[in-house]
């Protein structure tokens, strides 16, 4: 039991170190936007409708088909899928290739 707890603590420390290494080069604004996105706290229409109660329509501003959530904007909007997701994919590939 105690051994399992020690292993879990070590794993958590390793994860924290990896996160610190990854984010140390980020600007503070970029880091805060990433954390907000992870916490689903970015001002999407879904957030404004369900959490803030400041809007009544939670549908995506671009496709008008699905709720405008972080997940939808990042990877599921049919309007963004036509060009933006491909452009993002190609950009990641280019950056990865440049750092190899
Ligand atoms: Zn959409």
Image: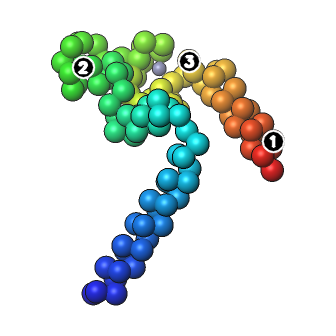
Q: Give the spatial CA distance, label 3 vs label 2.
A: 22 Å
Q: Is mark 3 within 8 Å of ligand 1?
A: yes
Instruction: State yes or no: discs 3 and 1 in contact (Cβ < 8 Å).
Output: no
Measured along the vertical axis of the image, is residue 76 above or below residue 9? above
The number of discs equals 3
Q: Nearer the viewer, mark 2 or mark 1?
A: 1
Of residues 85 and 37, the one drawn nearer to the viewer in this rendering? 37
- From the image, tell me which residue sits under label 2: 49
Residue 92 visible in the snapshot:
yes
Residue at image point 28% right, 86% down: 2
Q: Nearer the viewer, mark 3 or mark 2?
A: 2
SS at circle 1: helix
Mark closer to the chain start, 3 or 1: 3
Residue 46 is labelled as none
Q: Is mark 1 within 8 Å of ligand 1?
A: no
Q: Is residue 70 left or right of residue 2?
A: right
Q: Is mark 2 within 8 Å of ligand 1?
A: no
Residue at image point 56% right, 50% down: 22
Of residues 85 and 14, the one drawn nearer to the viewer in this rendering? 14
Q: Is residue 88 left or right of residue 29?
A: right
Measured along the vertical axis of the image, is residue 49 above or below residue 97? above
Q: Nearer the viewer, mark 3 or mark 1?
A: 1
Residue at image point 27% right, 87% down: 1
Residue at image point 28% right, 13% down: 57
- From the image, tell me which residue sits under label 3: 79
Q: Residues within 10 Å of mark 3 (few under 14, many from 20)?
A: some
Residue 58 location, quadrant: top left
Of residues 83 and 15, the one drawn nearer to the viewer in this rendering? 15
- From the image, tell me which residue sits under label 1: 98
SS at circle 2: helix
Mark closer to the chain start, 2 or 1: 2
Q: Residues within 10 Å of mark 2 (few under 14, many from 20)?
A: some
């Amino acid at each position: 039991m105690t051994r399992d707890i020690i292993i879990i603590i070590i794993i958590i420390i390793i994860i924290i170190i990896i996160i610190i290494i990854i984010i140390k080069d980020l600007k503070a604004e970029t880091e805060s936007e990433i954390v907000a996105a992870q916490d689903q706290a970015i001002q999407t229409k879904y957030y404004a409708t369900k959490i803030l109660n400041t809007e009544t329509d939670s549908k995506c501003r671009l496709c008008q088909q699905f709720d405008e959530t972080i997940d939808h904007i990042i990877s599921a909007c049919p309007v963004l899928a036509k060009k933006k997701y491909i452009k993002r994919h190609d950009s990641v590939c280019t950056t990865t290739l440049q750092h190899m």
